[in-house]
Image (cartoon, rainbow, N blue to C red):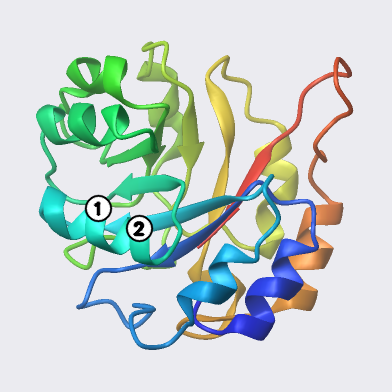
Amino acid sequence: MGDTATMHQLASLPVEMLGFIFYPKSPRCVVDKINPAEIAKLPEHIGRVGVFVNASKDEILRIAILFHLTVIQLHGNESVELCKELKAEGFIIIKAFNLYINNNYEAYTPYCHYFLFDTPSVKHGGTGQKFDWNLLTKYTCPTPFLLSGGIGPDDADAITKINHPQFAGIDINSRFEIEPGVKDVELIKRFIKLTPQPPKEGEGTAINKNIT
């Protein structure tokens, strides 16, 4: 997301993470669009996610400190070693993968808190297109995963029917936008009402919501 007012509106909703894209080629890149001090004002329970594509460790750490990030989402061809080093710095690590090819995600398991399964794209996300969710049945690693790629307002029912032990949540993006980087808050509110909400401690399960 790219504006402060919308960010704070979304932070008042039952979401677990808010994402900020730092990939210069993305129309949603937030550099020079959002005040880092405003991100620091977000509630403590909300993960502040920085999305990077093939950035260096030094660049990721520089931006993470400047923008008060707590979660690093790696959406390119980042190595196992980079995930290991960033996790050692104290960040929650999310690594994106394409299930259409044989990914060596098993090697990343010790160093990632979540995997993210997205639709393949040379633009590294934001396509508004789904991949074949039947591929999820082939995933047997212990690392929880987030589902992304073309999730829209009409997918709430299908999402609630996903039955996979490692399914931890969803990442919504382009199909909830008025224009790239500008989220439709009312549309997101309606969508959230149709999906399981975060439970009270010890009461069942829920679908985590990450808004990028």
Query: In the figure, is residue 178 to the left or right of 86?
Result: right
- In this view, 16 is above or below 106: below
Query: In the figure, is residue 61 to the left or right of 37?
Result: left
Q: Position of residue 144 (x, y in %)?
A: 48, 23
Using the image, tell me which numbered label, if any, was put on residue 65: 2
Query: In the figure, is residue 173 to the left or right of 160?
Result: left
Compute the Cα span from label 2 to label 1: 6 Å
Q: Position of residue 65 (x, y in %)?
A: 35, 58
Q: Residue at x 17, y 34 (%)?
A: 101
Of residue 211 and residue 118, the one placed in the foreground of this image is 211
Q: Position of residue 168 (x, y in %)?
A: 58, 29
- In this view, 210 is above or below 183: above
- In this view, 126 is above or below 143: below
Q: Amino acid at mark 2?
A: Ile
Q: Amino acid at mark 1?
A: Leu
Of residue 168 and residue 36, the one placed in the foreground of this image is 36
Query: SS class of the residue under badge 2?
Result: helix
- In this view, 78 is above or below 39: above
**Residue 17 visible, this angle:** yes
Query: SS class of the residue under badge 1?
Result: helix
Q: Which residue is mark 1?
A: 61
For label 1, count other residues whose C-alpha is less than 10 Å away and answer few (under 14), some (14-19) or many (20+): some
